[in-house]
Image (cartoon, rainbow, N blue to C red):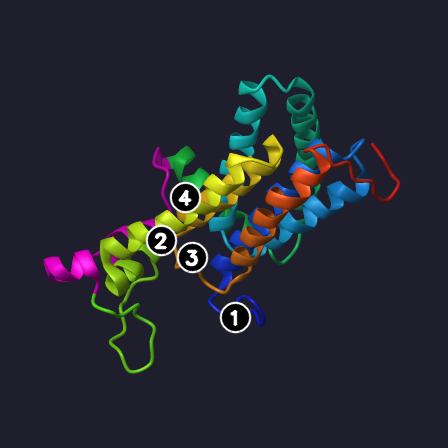
Amino acid sequence: MRNPGLFYTGFSILSLVYSLLFIIQLALIVNWRDRVRLFDLLVLVLLFMGMFFSGRAGFVVALFGVVLFLLLYFVHGQAVQFVRSVRVGFYFLFLGFGFSLVLSLSGYAYYLDWFFELFINFYEEGRLASKTTDTLLSQHYFLPGSASGVLFGVANFGRQYGLEYIPSDVGYVLFIHGLGVVGLVFSFGFFLLLSFLVFSKGACLTMRWLFLFVVLGILIGSFKDYYFLSHMGYTQILFLLFFAARFIGERAGGTMKITGPRGAL
């Protein structure tokens, strides 16, 4: 089964897109809402549900994003945002607990064991791993057979019609087979250039770190699937944030304030 539209390659990529939107929505609540609203929390829950049912890769990226922003607010002494983040987290955990309780009583209870397999295995076996990570590490990580292939690739990304299929889903593996380590460095250079343009001027602190989070999310996700410069939804999110950080943030002086539906908490 595949999702139509932007997400032709599977649930892992869809999960990543949900995770990026989840963190963006969280940043919106903490930084630009005048108060925490029930509508915003429901959007968070809906995004989490989409992430929950589509894949676990997005959950790892979302968890990384939450830690990143808590560290950001703590290091920069933004006590108000830090406290609001913790407060939103408690609200969300309460709603998430209710969602998990309902799910555990339904026919989809097995999703809980599947989604939290990493943490269950860590609690029971002392190792942070799952069947998916074991399969990835044992079968999906390998390089081209020659030194020139490693450096410059073999012009095969593993999924083109008429070329040999490469039995790996890992983005770094497929990209190295296509353009080699040299091409990988140039790809990193593209992301570094965009990040430099965002951090150089114009954007407020949160917009800069949101953009950096999306870039890091793509790089982290590439350990699982192919995420480099693709046409999937996360690329659109990346460029939308780029233009927002460069132009909207500059015009507003980094002090954008957004209002929304009533129902504040």
Front: mark 1 or 3: 3
Q: Amino acid at mark 1?
A: Arg
Q: Is residue 33 above or below residue 177?
A: above
Q: Is residue 75 above or below residue 153?
A: above
At label 4, counting other C-alpha atoms closer than 10 Å, the crowd grade (few under 14, some 14-19, many 20 or more) is some
Q: Which residue is mark 3?
A: 227
Q: Is residue 154 left or right of residue 96?
A: left
Label 1 SS: loop
> Percent position (x, y) of residue 114?
49, 51
Q: Residue at x 49, y 43 (%)?
A: 61
Q: Earlier in the sequence, mark 4 or mark 2?
A: 2
Tell me if label 4 and label 2 are in contact, CB under 8 Å. no
Front: mark 3 or 2: 2
Looking at the image, which is closer to me, 9 or 138?
9
Front: mark 3 or 4: 4
Give the residues drawn in magenta, as a range: 125-153
Tell me if label 4 and label 1 are in contact, CB under 8 Å. no
Q: Is residue 265 left or right of residue 116?
A: right
Residue 141 covered by magenta stretch: yes
At label 1, counting other C-alpha atoms closer than 10 Å, the crowd grade (few under 14, some 14-19, many 20 or more) is few
Q: Amino acid at mark 3?
A: Tyr
> Percent position (x, y) of residue 243?
60, 49
Q: Earlier in the sequence, mark 3 or mark 2?
A: 2
Q: Earlier in the sequence, mark 1 or mark 2?
A: 1
Q: Residue furthest bottom?
A: 162
Q: Amino acid at mark 4?
A: Leu
> Percent position (x, y) of residue 91?
72, 33
The reply to whether residue 208 is in sight is: yes
Q: Which residue is mark 4?
A: 192
Q: Which residue is mark 2?
A: 187
Residue 256 covered by magenta stretch: no
